[in-house]
Image (spheres, rainbow, N blue to C red):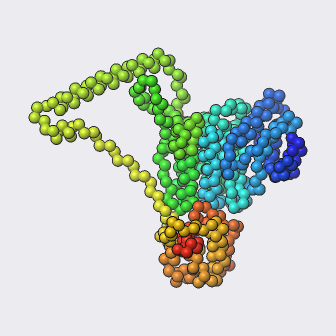
Amino acid sequence: MIAGRYRLQQKIGSGAMGVVWQAVDERLHRTIAVKQLLLQPGYTPEETEEARERSMREGRIAARLQHQHAIAVFDVAEDEGQPVLIMEYLPSTSLAAIIDEQGVQPALRVAHIGVQVAGALAAAHMAGIVHRDLKPGNILLGENDLAKITDFGISRAIGDVAVTKSGILAGTPAYLAPEVALGRDPAPASDVFSLGSTLYASIEGGPPFGTDENAISLLHRVARGQFDPPRQAGPMAPALMQMLRPDPVDRPTMAQTRELLQAVLDGRPVPNFAPGAGWARPAPQPAAAPAPPQPPQAGGTLHAPQAGLGNGTNPNASPPTRVGAAAPQAAVEPERRRGKTVALWFVAIVVAALIGIMAVNAFGQPGASSDQGASQSSPAPQPEPAPASTTSAAPTTTSAPPSTSAAPTSTSSSAPTTSSQQKKPTKKELLSTVEKYYELVPDDLDKAWKLLGPSLKSQGKEKYEKFWKQIDDVKIVGDPMLSGSNVLVNLQYTKDGKKITEMHVLGMAQTEDGDPVINTDRHT
């Protein structure tokens, strides 16, 4: 019994810092998880106190984050003078265990997991929290691939006092960002890279920089930031390459990362965020006297934007450090700064005077026409802005036809026109339609045809029947999952005695009568 309230039942996990137990809160009669601090033998009293502080800090940090895709911390209790964390219990398997048992995962399943994790981390960054140790082992998957992040034990709250013992590497080297491997402070952009490494490992079977028992050798590879582009990622490849940009200021923010992954999941073109677009400098604060604009120093840092601009970062967060950046310069004495400011203003006034004299001479020339004067005074044309990446409501289709499919994919994906007053199908109705459809095929194609939308019907019934006559049997593996207007479903086909498993993303629509139908079908 912990703190006279929490009764331990069975051990469910362990890590470098502690052991996790399944337990029961006897006051509230609910199942919980209890994390006990694990002290290494031979700790000095000072090191023991440091470990206690670290555990208390973990509780303070994690309790600040309340998100549906993060394991909640309910309480910090003490047992024989040692702190323990009381946490939400989620019947789950870690992503690391799934990769070990099942091997590489389909790109769309990985995107589904990534969207959830990115949402939680974006919320963490807004709360001033950097995880610092994101890896497959810290992502738990429950029923229907419900993903939750856990173990903020070595994460650092922005502005909180770091208590990690000097010389101890905080973080798993294989999933660290290059700037962290170089010894720089972790920032929100570091979590973006670690999430990219985690998703990369899920699809490719290993992290971008590989694995190595020699941590120093692995750190050197990470610090160089060079890795092989993903080969099996398919639609996930553009998102991964943006998340894994070596320079942190070139990566998307976590909120933008969620947009990338959601686009993959929806079958839309993946937006390309321009390097540095998410980590813009904050707007200058009003000053008593105007000061001339200072050019950015080479290799300097870019500051996180102000809150409320939709970029998922905290205004007080540490800015991402540019890889290869020079060390910060010492503060310049106020007298020298004032001297430089005066000198710059003097130069600016002289230049302005010269420009004014030149303008007077140009416009005052005898015989000059008004048209000439206008052409001389007009500003130089501004370069056209780069075209924004286009997005489309229609899902993209693969260049090669799928080996098996619920129905051959059509390039058109327009949904049936429905009245704005029409009631939308419920989640239960959408999932029930998908389950019913795969119960009908391939035996009762007439009834199955009625459950398709116009986009899939545009292929013609003859082609549709020809496809399904090749299939001996099809069944749903696991439970279908709803993501927006799409249903994700794992299908196992039997053809000529061979079994093939594919994940399909079914775009759902509704008829004029309000009945749900399957309008598009993509597979990975």
In this view, which residue lies farthest toward the front? 421
The quarter of the picture where residue 220 lies is top right
Decide which of 522, 376 is in the foreground and name it: 376
The quarter of the picture where residue 264 lies is bottom right
Decide which of 361, 245 is in the foreground and name it: 361
- 9 sits to left or right of 297: right
Quadrant occupied by the C terminus = bottom right
Q: Position of residue 197 (x, y in %)?
A: 62, 49
- 422 sits to left or right of 22: left
Image mark count = 0
Point 11% across, 32% down: residue: 366
**19 is higher (above) or lower (below) than 140:** above
Q: Residue 207: tell me if it is visible.
A: no
Q: Position of residue 279 (x, y in %)?
A: 51, 41
In this view, which residue lies farthest toward the left? 367
Decide which of 30, 323 is in the foreground and name it: 30
- 30 sits to left or right of 101: right
**194 is higher (above) or lower (below) than 431:** above
Q: Position of residue 45 (x, y in %)?
A: 83, 28
Point 52% across, 25% down: residue: 329
Point 76% across, 44% down: residue: 74
Decide which of 485, 200 is in the foreground and name it: 485
Quadrant occupied by the N terminus = top right
Q: Residue 257: tell me if it is visible.
A: yes
Point 30% across, 22% down: residue: 350
The quarter of the picture where residue 95 lies is bottom right
